[in-house]
Image: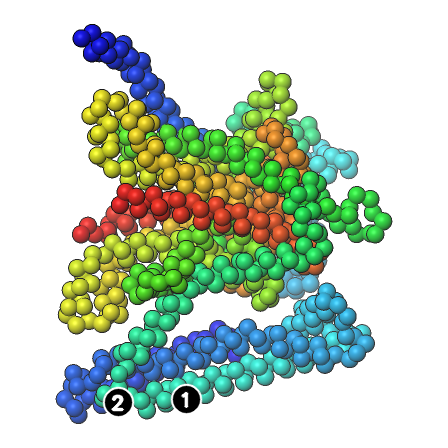
Amino acid sequence: MSKPVNNLEKIRKSLNRRNRAEKRFRWYGLVAVLIGLAAVAVLFTDIISKGHGAFRITYMQLEVNYDQDLIGINNLTDPEQLMLGDWQAIPKVALRNQFPEVSGRKDKRNLYKLVSNGAGFDLKDRLLANPLLLGTSETIWVLTDDDIDTYYKSWLDGEPYAARLSDKQVTWIHELHDEGKIRLQFNSNLFTRGDSREPEQAGIRGAVMGSLLTLILTLLLSFPIGVSAAIYLEEFAPKNGWTDFIEVNINNLAAVPSIIFGLLGLAIFINFFHIPRSVPIVGGLVLTLMTLPTIIITSRAAIKSVPPSIREAALGMGASKYQMVLHHVLPLALPGMLTGAIIGMAQALGESAPLLMIGMVAFIVDIPGGFSDPATVLPVQIFLWADSPERAFIEKTSAAIMVLLSFLIIMNTSAVWLRKRLERRW
Amino acid sequence: MQATNILFLILGLGCFAFYLGRGRSLAIAKPLGGIRHLHSLPSYYGFHAAIWCALPSLILLSLWLVFDDLLINSMVMDALPDIDAPTDAASYNLLLNKIANIADGILPRTAENSALIAAADQMINLRVISRWSLTALILTLSLVGLTWAWSRTAQLFRARPVVERVAENLLLACACLAIFTTIGIVFSVMFESIQFFRSVPFFDFVFGLDWSPQTAIREDQVGSSGSFGAVPLFVGTLLISAVAMIVAVPVGLMSAIFLAEYANKTVRSYVKPALEVLAGIPTVVYGFFAALTVAPFLRDLGASFGLSVSSESALAAGGVMGVMIIPFISSLADDVITAVPQSMRDGSLAMGATKSETVRRVIIPAALPGIVGGIMLAVSRAIGETMIVVMAAGMAARLTANPLESVTTVTVQIVTLLTGDQEFDSPKTLAAFALGLMLFSVTLLLNIFALHIVKKYREQYE
């Protein structure tokens, strides 16, 4: 008769240990979740802390003189003169006037490095927009070089980074600062210009346009094709080996590494069909093939969620199968399909590996205007900038990432919103 | 005429045909006393006409666009005088490009290449002829189709079944695109790989221990004969994937268990989407994060312990990749855990087991096939992941199992071999396709196996 008592005691004794194990297990779970959340937080704070500076850029005030002899032109309508004009001389002279004490070739060269080497061309554009300025002078804010920009921002933040500047240049910057002739402005170049080797002149406009063109093509191709495939598989396909084979294919394609689609694009579209490299057409085609499985799978789920009673009612009223699908099932499944399409597009927007294969990594300054202009896309631009040695590009890269992430956040929240708003519970 | 214009022409004709066909059916119906006397609704007669008008033309257009360049090119090249005729494939393409560039006005028309200018003029001529004959053909074809459809439109003509059959075939074609994509992938990597294995034996590639794909520019160059032993790449890929899995599996699995079994509804509704944010972040962002934040951090951390950590260490790339995979594993595991029937939980709890004992002894064993399948899918994803490793892992192929050193992966090598200018017959470029073939076969096997397991598991509890 003593055995049950013993067991009870055993259980009572082990209870503490078991409860501790329970608590520990719960903690492990909590810690895992916290690690995940911490990763999100660290990632976002890191990107934002690196990139927020890029939205402002350093300008300096100069008294520029649009001297005809200095530039070497007398007629603003003559393209040859415009091309041959020494535009960079305008900021150089202005800098010499600002710092008259500077002499010696080396010092002068350092002085000229204060302004961006695109400053002359900015002044040219300004002059072309206001031809009356020729021969006059004005006080204007001019873009500085990226090293100056990096130093000035880091100095304002309290940890000056002067690795690439000479002592004299630093003194000049402080002189300008004391006179109030150097300041941070909104960096509109970032949003209005294409890529450049000079960080201060580089912008994401070209990449954003490239992404837009590529995505338009992807959406135009993959949405209709994906929805048609989903309709066929859900509503019309007979249950046979062929249909199973299609299904297996779709499921596998959804898990094939994206770089393989790049190889496909390179071998088929570029080497076989001879479509030029780096154009949004090829990018769009490759991304279409890549996003199709996602769109088909989500569209099928949307069609599946339409209750059979709707179909039976339509058929019962004498509709043909096509009328049933087109007039009843499709409109009811459309919100789900749209959500799937947005998610697919978000995936395509963030994708870069296959585009590297088809030559969308080229250095392209011009902003693409059509589907057959060479272009790059935003994620690839990020990849290119991340590889650049200039320190100022780190900031730019993070800013481009912030733009990309905000696009993605907008797309994904609209997908969630759309689902919540239009979803029907049967 | 531009191809896009021809496309719009066809679509316009199709719309026109729709209204014509519909109008004709209405006209037929009117004296009979309304459309209820027709076999099909008037719009079906419209679609019938539109299909006959546009579909053959569209097929012709696409075939023409695929083949006309090839035909024109070969005609131009055949017409070249013998002295200029190219001997091998490379110079053939070069010459063809030159001619095309002269024809497009990109290259100047200078005196010394008069033969090429003649060829370019011929090319321009042929292109014009091709476009105009295409336009003429398509117009005739559309009008013939339209007339045929018009003549068939009658009171008892069964338009609806015809239209629906065509529509069904179009839908089927869309669904088959997935198969064509797979075939395309297999063929494109196979074809180039076979060419590669002609110059580099298969076993040297799969079992070779030395990877240095530089090929000699000069015959007598030292150390650049190019050796294509892929083992270091496979080892590097596995090393980085293993690091990723060591991060992702415990964290993903435990957070799935916590969210499914412990967390209340509000916590779940906030934490789950927050974790899924990780899945939506583009890989290039992770690559940037790994290369510029995690790798320097690990290097400095290692230095403070007296360890030398490479600034392109497998640990940084793999760790960040693991973070990327966390939501993938946690959402898959969450699916299979919630699919375990409640009765099993209740049974275990009723026997006096604690919650954690229920999870470990009942739920996990029951969900194991699904979890294993999910982990395999995650492994296949880690193997195929490109941007993180391209940005954060090394380029040099090193045979090591030390995660603090820099290793390279299959995907990194594919990207380095294929970006930039390339000729298509060098083993260096072809090696990328051979690597692609390896990558595709391994991930395909993993996927098929994993999907099979997951599907079987689902059936078990449904």
Seen in the picture, residue A190 relative to B133 is either above or below; the reply is above
Left or right side of B211 for A149? left
* Residue at (32% x, 45% y) in the render: B458
The residue sitting at the front extreme is A1
Give the residue type at disc 2.
Answer: Ala
Instruction: Name the residue nearer the viewer: A292 or A52.
Output: A292
- At numbered mark 1, what does the secondary structure look like: helix, strand or loop? helix
Q: Is residue A41 visible?
A: no
Rendering coords of residue B137 (x, y %): 49, 85
Rendering coords of residue B132 (x, y %): 54, 84
Left or right side of A314 for A138? right
Instruction: Name the residue nearer the viewer: A94 or B412.
Output: B412
Give the residue type at disc 1.
Answer: Val
Q: Are marks 1 and 2 on the same chain?
A: yes
Seen in the picture, residue B212 relative to B422 is either above or below; the reply is above
Q: Quadrant of the N terminus of chain A?
A: top left
Pointer 2: residues within 10 angstroms few (<14), some, or many (20+)? some
* Residue at (45% x, 77% y) in the render: B58
**Which disc is residue B144 wearing?**
1
Precedes in sequence: disc 1 or disc 2: 1
Which scheme is used to colour this image of the protein?
rainbow
Seen in the picture, residue B114 relative to A148 is either above or below; the reply is below
State the residue position of label 2.
Answer: B154
Pointer 1: residues within 10 angstroms few (<14), some, or many (20+)? some
* Residue at (29% x, 63% y) in the render: A235
Rendering coords of residue A241 (x, y %): 38, 62
Residue under mark 1: which chain is it in?
A: B
